[in-house]
Image (cartoon, rainbow, N blue to C red):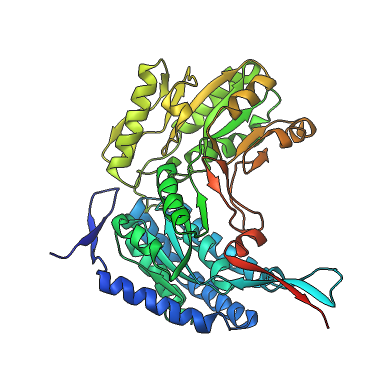
Amino acid sequence: MKKEIKTYNPYNGEHLRTYEIDSKKALNKKLQLAESTFNNWKHLSIAQRIELLQNLANEVDSNIDELSELISLEMGKPILESKSEIEKCILLINFYIINADQFLQDDLIDTEAHESFISYDPLGCILAIMPWNYPFWQVFRFAIPTLTAGNVALLKHASNVTGCAIAIEKLFLDAGFPIGCFQTLLTDHDGIEELLEDDIIKAVSLTGSEKAGKKIAEIAGKNLKPSLLELGGNNACIILKDADLDKYLDTIVKARMQNSGQSCIAAKRFIVVEEIYDEFLDRFKAKVENLKYGNPLKEDTTISCLARKDLAKILKDQIKASIDLGAEVLTGNKSNGAYYQPTILTNVSSKMPVFKEETFGPVAAIIKAKSEEDAYEIASNSKYGLGTMVFTSNYDAAAKRISNVEDGAFFINEMVKSDPRLPFGGTKNSGYGRELSKEGMLAFVNKKTIYINK
């Protein structure tokens, strides 16, 4: 019996489509095609690749409504947020159109040689294992710099966004990229280890859970292949006594509730100094309760369901375990199917799941800090290291903390977010390696030393 992937609308449970999983023979054919395509693709000039990037930007832009709707149907993201995700993909493409040539230029190094420099050669076929929460953005931020550097890509996307995965491959083909340059694999996780062990696969990039990251790193390491891991997080959002709530409260709410709370870099632990605690709690609660739940395809919906029912169940268990340990529900904590009501928990301690673990949904854990110093110490008490954000009017004092924050990002008076112009990635159990910016383009290249004497 042939294996299948079925996709569903998480908002109403409606069956969307059924896809047949690739057979072992089909997967092998895609691997062979990737290798043969790479042997030609790597010789194309940067100018030729950039021309294809421009075609791709046009394709994405001309299909923005259809692509946005596909995101909302498959994983429940409010339609305006889905559209913003697609627009961000276009921004990313345009960034590399402008900068790719410069990023990939040989670096001349002054030595005793007649000529010495570093060249950047593509590695070959790179496997990407991507999540469902930003089904286009996560793939594009891997694929655009990776392909432009001269590699080819195979995508294993999350099964619940299979339609998005297929649509992405079609966009590359319609833009004129060679067949085999970017391919989607319809397979389950059982086939990943065998894929990684194949000599055609030269490296792997994974965005996903800590558990998945450890497994992939183990397989990649066993096969001496480079890996880039962007894993979970439980980012701290520090609210100091001089925080400008009039100016930044909407940003603070968005930092937790955007994408119905399903983001690795979302603010998950709100650490509030006692001088502003009561005011913050009252105003934050009012904003959260004002979020409008509804059909993700409607533009007035500001928060919708989670991407799957099992995700709501996991969140419910984390919240219940935290309540059993003494957390108190200030608002929310009702659920139905894939829907989870925006929830605020107070009296949160470091022993609770909502403090220690990554919570993937609309729950904000509030911790009262005795002082500014205490707030930073609480924030650093985490096995994760994606990002920390602090809201304060004393920018200079916050800037002095930069070297003390171990995370991959430190944002002052802004929510942690990814930007094509800046490197993105984490520390500790949040993974290693960097995407985006120049670092993302050089993630999967051979930095080759050239030394020439006459």
* Left or right placement of residue 155 versus residue 233 in this view: left
Visible in this render: residue 208?
no
State the residue in front, 312 or 449. Answer: 449
Residue depicted at x 63% and y 24%: 377
The correct choice, above or below, for 22 with respect to 81 in the image is: below
The correct choice, above or below, for 307 with respect to 413 in the image is: below
Visible in this render: residue 122?
yes
Residue 428: image x %, image y %? 56, 39
Task: Name the image quarter holding residue 357.
Answer: top left
The correct choice, above or below, for 26 with respect to 273 in the image is: below
Which corner quadrant holds the N terminus? bottom left
State the residue in front, 387 or 67. Answer: 387
Residue 43: image x %, image y %? 58, 83
Residue 214: image x %, image y %? 44, 46
State the residue in front, 170 or 386. Answer: 386
Residue depicted at x 33% and y 31%: 316
Q: How many marks overall?
A: 0
Which corner quadrant holds the C terminus? bottom right
* Left or right placement of residue 337 versus residue 346 in this view: left
Residue depicted at x 60% and y 41%: 415
Task: Name the image quarter holding residue 442.
Answer: bottom right
